[in-house]
Image (cartoon, rainbow, N blue to C red):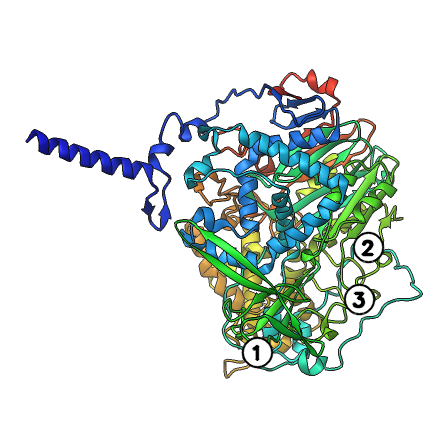
């Protein structure tokens, strides 16, 4: 009996050891190794940071050349004072790793198509292998390799990256298993050594996020169910009322290159009314990735000094995309936000000037149909001959499973993203190569490293001249009083609608023929109106610009910013904070009175009449408590569906959505009446019918929201900030904040202003900033999300470009770290 008990105890012990030392499958996901994860010595307990944690230390590394002091202010923002530049980059790498290691590595795993290595092929309904295949076939690794080659040819960039990488690895090498960030313990893997290639991948990930949006397949489908006239009405080049970024006249060029449209374009390219098969769901960046920025001259400010404002609109995550930092060396003294994973301060200011960025929104990604000799993809037909294709074998490692290999052919246009083994979105069984500007060698980091040391307008122009992709609008001010904006990037010179649809790739006739000359990408410098601005609208007046500029341009944010700035005088930073967080909805101002002209409310019941009265008397401010904003959002979507849905749903395939400005313009021009009749019913519907029925159809949704106490706008849109792994306990959800699409405060579901910055270039610089996160990437730290409430309340922190003597005497500093050889 005693032996039996011993055997049972031994079996239980073995089972427990196996259970505690291995990941288990639970609801389709893998658990952590419970024995390790729950261990007081090595597990998650070690990630609980004391509330009164101090950040002190004396660190010595042989890679350093001098001494560096780091002071952490009361918000855990490091102020770095280095004897030389490379030491500053080393320390930035060390600090990025100390506070954001898991985040920065996870993002490069995503960019490099390696998530399956750590997540498995799928988990919680997310197909990580599908995501990895997408990024490998898009050519992200290929693009990063090309960018790395350009980076390492630039000695300034190479030395900064080498020092930065050494700093990251110095921190990684100091870690014991118990010190790993919490997410490594949850997912059961270890950090690997950082490389310059990982920094290049991060840069390409930003290029994908900001210059990876395209609708070539959707637009190709749309032209199969619409006439040319209908297509132009629903998907215009730009809206008539668009206010361009650059309003100055364009320079006149003596020898202007004019791209030639192929003679067979009407038959091979503009070929309407053909059939296509079902579409796959697409992986795309958010269409609304954009930003606001503007600068006002001293002639319009109370202080007589220029003020710059910048707030990039991106996906909101925890840990935050941004890491706030000051870097001071003999060559520069700069404050702003950096991307963890590369040496940079992307948006910020120094002793002499300030700068901000908005996305250019121009489409620089096209697809070409390739004709291969056979299924081996070794040779393809181009310009009347068979050409040899280069081949890449992209090996995707999968956690606990055999690897998957993607065989990708490389053509003159770029990698063949779609082939019969990886079907295109339209299931045509054809081969499509992706031609993307981000594939080319580029040196975006070189631009940023020059910009942080800029002293004047000419330095600014020189710095941004090397910026390639993603195209950006760089706004600039300096202490000499200059204000300026210029769109930086490399853009192809295109004929009308080139690249909107899938293109033939058997010769060069549809290829990009040239790049636009820098002289046709001019800066707007010290304009008479006293301000410059951009909010992702068209860069130039399309009526006078000589080239087609495909893209996703936004109308209303730029319009309302310009309206406010035009009327303002004696501007202060307080005024700019109110403008940057404005919830005024210009789209609603234009749409609601128009809709009310066409609504027939005589047969409305009590609930319908009450909601109509609410939206009719609404002040067009989409703040957190607004009910009118909820009604309008639903009504607008419903009207678009009623007016255009029957035509667009002739196909079972996704097509581009009709944008609200297009609906407004078409109603004003009576063009919407062409689509008002429902082609699927025997009757004849009018615009009055559509707008009235659209309103009645949303009332049940509103009643349900009222019953659930979610009728107010903040509760209805239910905005929040997700942890990168979508873990609710590590996220900040259900935020009580207004804003939304087409609004200056562009906060929607999980997307919005990721860094708000205002800089007034007085002698003692007067600057403010906030982002929705915290300096620490550790969910167990009070500095993980401590900025979120301030951001949600539309408040700011006063930020300071201190010299070391002043910083050392601040009473609320959280610690000091000394780095030396």
Disc 3 crowd, CA 10 A, few/some/many (<14, 14-19, 20+): some
Identify residue for label 2.
246
Up/down of 266 relative to 152, above or below: below
Q: Disc 1 vs disc 3: which is toward the camera?
A: 3
> Distance between the Cα atoms at labels 3 and 2?
15 Å
Residue at the far left: name it: 1
Q: Check the picture and name the quadrant holding the C terminus.
A: top right
What residue is rendered at 78% in x and 34% in y? 760
> Distance between the Cα atoms at labels 2 and 1?
40 Å
Identify residue for label 1.
677
602 left or right, relative to 467: left
Circle 3: element type: loop
What residue is rendered at 61% in x and 30% in y? 95
Q: Which of disc 1 and disc 2 is earlier in sequence?
A: 2
User: x%, y% of residue 689?
Assistant: 55, 73
Identify residue for label 3.
547
Q: Which of disc 3 and disc 1 is earlier in sequence?
A: 3
**Whether label 3 touches label 2, CB < 8 Å:** no
Q: Nearer the viewer, residue 622 or 609?
A: 622
What residue is rendered at 48% in x and 65% in y? 697
Circle 2: element type: loop
């Amino acid at each position: 009996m005693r032996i039996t008990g011993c055997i049972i105890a031994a079996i239980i012990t073995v089972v427990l050891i196996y259970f505690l030392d291995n990941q288990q499958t639970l609801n389709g996901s893998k658990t952590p190794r419970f024995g390790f994860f729950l261990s007081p010595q090595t597990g998650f307990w070690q990630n609980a940071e004391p509330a009164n944690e101090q950040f002190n230390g004396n660190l010595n590394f042989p890679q350093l050349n001098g001494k560096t002091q780091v002071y952490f202010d009361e918000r855990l923002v490091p102020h770095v004072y280095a004897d030389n530049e490379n030491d500053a980059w080393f320390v930035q790498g060390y600090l990025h790793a100390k506070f954001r290691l898991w985040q920065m590595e996870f993002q490069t795993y995503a960019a490099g198509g390696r998530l399956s290595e750590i997540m498995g092929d799928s988990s919680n309904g997310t197909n990580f292998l599908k995501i990895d295949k997408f990024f490998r076939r898009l050519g992200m690794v290929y693009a990063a390799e090309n960018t790395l080659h350009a980076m390492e040819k630039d000695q300034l960039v190479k030395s900064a990256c080498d020092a930065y990488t050494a700093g990251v690895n110095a921190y990684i090498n100091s870690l014991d298993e118990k010190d790993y960030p919490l997410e490594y313990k949850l997912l059961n893997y270890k950090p690997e050594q950082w490389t310059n290639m990982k920094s290049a991948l991060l840069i390409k990930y930003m290029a994908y996020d900001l210059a990876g949006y395209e609708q070539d397949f959707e637009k190709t489908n749309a032209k199969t169910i619409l006439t040319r006239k209908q297509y132009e009405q629903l998907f215009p080049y730009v809206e008539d009322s668009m206010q361009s970024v650059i309003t100055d006249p364009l320079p006149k060029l003596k020898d202007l290159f004019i791209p030639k449209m192929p003679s067979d374009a009407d038959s091979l390219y503009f070929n309407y009314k053909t059939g296509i098969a079902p579409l796959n769901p697409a992986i795309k960046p958010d269409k609304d990735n954009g930003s606001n920025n503007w600068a006002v001259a001293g002639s319009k400010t109370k202080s007589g000094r220029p003020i710059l404002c910048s707030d990039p609109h991106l996906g909101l995550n925890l840990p935050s995309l941004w890491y706030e930092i000051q870097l001071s060396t003999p060559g520069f003294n700069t404050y702003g936000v950096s991307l963890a994973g590369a040496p940079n301060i992307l948006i910020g200011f120094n002793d002499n000037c300030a700068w901000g960025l908005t996305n250019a929104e121009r489409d620089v990604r096209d697809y070409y149909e390739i004709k291969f000799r056979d299924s081996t993809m070794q040779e393809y037909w181009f310009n009347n001959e068979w050409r040899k294709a280069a081949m890449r074998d992209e090996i995707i490692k999968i956690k606990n499973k055999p690897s998957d290999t993607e065989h990708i052919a490389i053509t003159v246009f770029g990698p063949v993203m779609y082939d019969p083994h990886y079907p295109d979105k339209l299931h045509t069984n054809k081969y499509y190569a992706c031609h993307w500007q981000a594939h080319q060698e580029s040196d975006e980091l070189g631009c940023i490293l020059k910009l942080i040391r800029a002293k004047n307008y000419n330095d600014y122009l020189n710095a941004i001249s090397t910026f390639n992709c993603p195209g950006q609008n760089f706004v600039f001010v300096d202490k000499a009083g200059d204000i300026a904006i210029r769109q930086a990037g490399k853009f192809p010179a295109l004929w009308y609608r080139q690249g909107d649809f899938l293109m033939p790739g058997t010769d060069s006739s549809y290829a990009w023929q040239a790049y636009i000359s820098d002289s046709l990408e001019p800066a707007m410098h010290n304009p008479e109106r006293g301000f410059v601005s951009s909010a992702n609208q068209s860069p130039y007046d399309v009526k006078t610009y000589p080239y087609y500029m495909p893209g996703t341009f936004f109308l209303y944010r730029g319009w309302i910013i310009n309206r406010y700035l035009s009327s303002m005088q004696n501007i202060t930073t307080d005024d700019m904070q109110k403008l940057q967080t404005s919830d005024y909805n210009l789209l609603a101002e234009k749409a609601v009175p128009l809709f009310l002209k066409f609504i027939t409310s005589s047969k409305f019941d009590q609930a319908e009449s009450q909601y109509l009265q609410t939206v009719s008397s609404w002040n067009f401010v989409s703040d957190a408590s607004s009910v009118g904003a909820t009604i309008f959002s639903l009504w607008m979507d419903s009207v678009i569906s009623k007016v255009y849905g029957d035509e667009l749903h002739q196909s079972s395939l996704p097509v581009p959505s009709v944008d609200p400005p297009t609906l407004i313009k078409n109603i004003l021009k009576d063009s919407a009446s062409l689509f008002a009749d429902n082609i699927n019913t025997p009757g004849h519907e009018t615009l009055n019918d559509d707008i009235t029925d659209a309103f009645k159809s949303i009332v049940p949704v509103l009643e349900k929201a009222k019953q659930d106490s979610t009728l107010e706008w903040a509760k209805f849109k239910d905005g929040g900030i997700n942890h990168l792994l979508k873990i609710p306990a590590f996220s900040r959800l259900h935020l009580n904040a207004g804003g939304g699409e087409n609004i200056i405060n562009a906060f929607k579901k999980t997307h919005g202003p990721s860094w708000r910055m205002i800089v007034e270039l007085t002698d003692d610089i007067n600057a403010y900033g906030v982002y929705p996160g915290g300096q620490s990437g550790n969910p167990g730290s009070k500095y993980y999300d401590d900025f979120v409430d301030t951001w949600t309340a539309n408040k700011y922190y006063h930020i300071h470009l201190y010299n070391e003597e002043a910083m050392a005497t601040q009473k609320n500093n959280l610690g000091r770290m000394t780095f030396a050889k």
